[in-house]
Image (tube, helix red, strand yellow):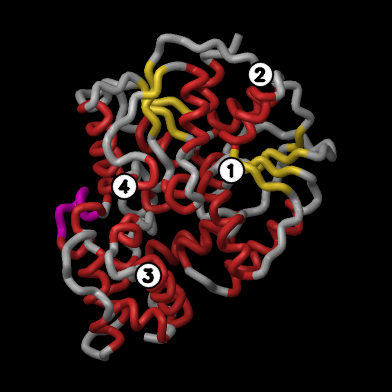
Amino acid sequence: MNLSEKARTHIDACRFCWMCRHICPIGNATGQERNTARARALGLSLVVRGAEKTEDVIDNVYECSLCGACVKECVTGWDPVMFVQEAKTDAVLSGVIPAYIEKMLETKERTGSVYGAPVQGLPVRENGEDVLLFLGQDARHKSPASCKNAAAVLEKAGVKYGCLRTEPESGYAMWFLTGNTAETQEAAKACAAVLNKYKTVVVYDPADLSFIKRQYREWGIAVAAETVGFADFLLRLIAEKKLQVRRSKRAYTVQDSFHTARELENAESMRKLVALCGENREMLCCGKDTFLAGNLLMNEYMPEVMREVARRRLESAKNIGAETVVTESPAEYEQLRALGDGAVRVVRVLSSEEMLLENLK
């Protein structure tokens, strides 16, 4: 396996202290030791040492959600996300990726998205405005209602914005599936070229926002446009009196996206938004310590596990008496809502814009 010296060092750095075992959302959902960070490192170590083949462990590599909870908890500072992504890149270049990943990549080649053709009826405003609403693939393909609601809020605020009929991929989906390949970086460069036609880009999906702000910088891909998350843009519109919010007696519980709270170190914007709309009722494992509630890319090849991940998160909300869970992530929004109104679903699930819309004057 062709891994960097840094990745090899991190794979061998585990002290087996078990501090990360309890915080892996996939491991908690499956109950399998193979889904802990230390077990994944052991598997890759066997490949590096020639005791196993890449194809023997590659499924386990793709069972990682890249949420970074293990990175945050590691007392020795090792980074499983880094070596998992290097392992994916090596698997792609070696031609040993799982069939289900190859199928998704073939769909991307054929249709332009790993999800296939986009749904119809999405908001389109190609009018050359200075502000671009960048929806992202998860929202455009899997959460059309979120796209429409996000556009509705901007229209209520009188924002002159553009929303593209054909939107470039940020590169996040390709990075998740293939790591740091040339194709991923080319997708990122193509996206940056489109974003730089605007003064301000409002990035709806936290996954795209974190990828643009962090990974683009690492690759030296310049984005001259101001990139701002959707929650922060809503707060800006409220501060400018373009949106009038009436504080209700409702209680809202934030399901933090790890992309925002952990990767971008911003757990405050959503709480400021909630405080304007009603009571903020926290649940355990929030902010930078948040647990994942769903991943739509992984839902394509391990849906039962993703359902259990979402079920456990909603169960945590129920246990603290949550009335309404609010998330800014279209992936987590769709995965939580997919649980339906059964025994687990005793709380409402709203997107950030749905919460705002029900509290506008």
Q: Residue at x 51, y 57 (%)?
A: 173
Mark 2 residue element: loop
Residue 84 shows which numbered tag? 3
Q: Where is the N terminus found, in terms of image quarters?
A: bottom left
Q: Which residues lie in the magenta part? A: 26-32
Identify residue for label 2: 243
**Image spot of residue 322 (x, y percent):** 29, 23
Q: Residue at x 81, y 40 (%)?
A: 130
Q: Badge 3 local density, few (<14 within 10 Å), some, or many (20+)? A: many
Give the amino acid at mark 3.
Val
Identify residue for label 1: 118
Q: Where is the C terminus found, in terms of image quarters?
A: top right
Mark 1 residue element: loop
Left/right placement of residue 136 relative to residue 257 reads: right
**Image spot of residue 58 (x, y percent):** 32, 72
**Image spot of residue 50 (x, y percent):** 26, 91
Q: Nearer the viewer, mark 4 or mark 3?
A: 3
Q: Examine the rendered structure and indicate whether residue 286 appears above or below residue 97.
A: above
Q: Earlier in the sequence, mark 1 or mark 2?
A: 1
Q: Nearer the viewer, mark 3 or mark 1?
A: 3
Residues under labels 3 and 2: Cα distance? 43 Å
Quarter occupied by residue 169: bottom right
Residues under labels 4 and 2: Cα distance? 38 Å
Give the amino acid at mark 2.
Leu
Mark 3 residue element: helix
